[in-house]
Amino acid sequence: MILATQGDDLERRDARQYLEDRAVGTSEGVFWNMKCISPTTIFVPDILHTIYLGMLKHLMDWVMSFLKQHSRIDKFNQLWAMMPPYPGFARFNNP
């Protein structure tokens, strides 16, 4: 639980249930458990990180269903497999 969270356990459970009822993720962000970072100083970047992850998942789910609906998923997979690695993202055994 976040140290900056205020309220008693009942309020926290009610808040968590409210979010879960609306399909909002309640897992803690990746930065919240780092000892060298205060939750109040990392709050905005962590929210952005979490939002971007959610947006990416939503976008990929939408794109995949669109491609399947229009019978283009196989063509997409073939083209994707032919693309070279993006510089800096993939390293091979060569130094």
Image (cartoon, rainbow, N blue to C red):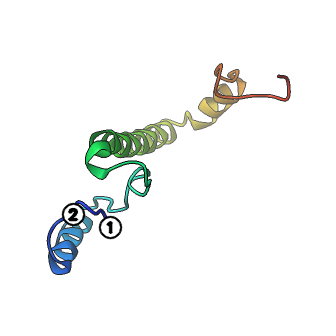
Q: Find the residue positioned furthest to the right.
A: 94
Q: Is residue 48 above or below residue 2?
A: above
Rendering coords of residue 59 (x, y %) = 40, 38
Q: Is residue 90 above or below residue 31?
A: above
Q: Which residue is mark 1?
A: 1
Amino acid beneath label 1:
Met
In screen coordinates, is 44 left or right of 58? left
Residue under the image location 38 percent in, 54 percent down: 32
Q: Which mark is residue 5?
A: 2
Rendering coords of residue 58 (x, y %) = 38, 44
Rendering coords of residue 35 (x, y %) = 43, 55
Disc 2: CA contacts within 10 A as few (<14), some (14-19) or many (>=20): few
In screen coordinates, is 48 left or right of 11? right
In screen coordinates, is 81 left or right of 14? right
Q: Find the residue positioned furthest to the front.
A: 36
The quarter holding residue 95 reads top right
Q: Could you tell me which secondary element the residue under label 1 belongs to?
A: loop
- The reply to whether callout 1 and callout 2 are in contact (CB within 8 Å) is yes
